[in-house]
Image (tube, rainbow, N blue to C red):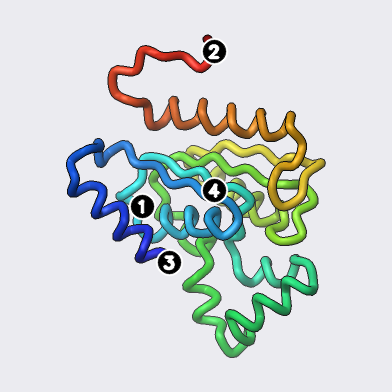
């Protein structure tokens, strides 16, 4: 999946229709995971990242998630002990030191799939090394944002973040108008 994302970006770059220094990656749930994999495995490619309800550490993900989901992940990834190297390689938290782009992370406080502790791991690690990270945990949400006020807040945060870190060329518009 990661190779597909990176190949897609390479293809888009070849068209010449965008500034290769202004590419952001964004996704929710598994897309949040792929966003984190992207900024850690190909850090030079991204100007910003917006992982939404991501998981970042296969070990803690399986340990902390809902038991039904835990069984599904174990069926996909295999035994944690036997496949330790695979779990480590596919856990973006192990490559946080590679991140160059600023990140905005959004999470739900009661997420049974991607617990807020996954987001907090990233925030703590990036802050520890002096990187740029913003985040919001919607304590009254789960895996995604069902409440309209939280959806609006999330959209505004994403728009403001992207305008600040990946501004469009010659934009004379304002989201406040």
Label 1 SS? helix
Between circles 2 and 4, the one closer to the viewer is 2
Label 3 SS? loop
Cα distance in 3D space between marks 3 and 1: 16 Å
The percent coordinates of residue 48 (x first, y second) are 42, 40
Q: Which numbered disc covers residue 51? A: 4
Residue 56 against residue 136 in the figure, above or below: below
Q: Which numbered disc covers residue 43? A: 1
Q: Which residue is mark 3?
A: 1
- Residue lying at the far top of the rendered structure: 177
Q: Which residue is mark 2?
A: 176
Mark 1 crowdedness (10 Å alpha carbons): few <14, some 14-19, many ≥20: some
Q: Residue at x 80, y 51 (%)?
A: 110
Cα distance in 3D space between marks 2 and 4: 24 Å
Label 2 SS? loop
User: Of label 3 and label 4, which has the lower sequence position?
Assistant: 3
């Amino acid at each position: 999946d990661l190779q597909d994302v990176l190949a897609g970006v390479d293809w888009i770059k070849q068209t010449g229709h965008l500034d290769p220094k202004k590419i952001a990656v964004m996704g929710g749930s598994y897309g949040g995971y792929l966003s984190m994999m992207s900024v850690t495995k190909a850090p030079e490619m991204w100007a910003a990242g917006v992982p939404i309800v991501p998981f970042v550490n296969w070990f803690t993900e399986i340990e902390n998630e809902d038991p039904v989901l835990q069984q599904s992940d174990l069926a996909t990834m295999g035994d944690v002990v036997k496949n330790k190297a695979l779990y480590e390689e596919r856990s973006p938290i192990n490559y946080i030191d590679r991140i160059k782009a600023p990140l905005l992370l959004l999470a739900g406080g009661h997420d049974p799939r991607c617990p807020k502790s996954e987001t907090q791991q990233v925030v703590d690690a990036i802050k520890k090394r002096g990187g740029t990270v913003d985040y919001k945990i919607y304590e009254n949400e789960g895996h995604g944002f069902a409440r309209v006020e939280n959806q609006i807040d999330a959209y505004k945060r994403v728009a403001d973040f992207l305008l600040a870190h990946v501004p469009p060329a010659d934009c004379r518009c304002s989201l406040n108008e």
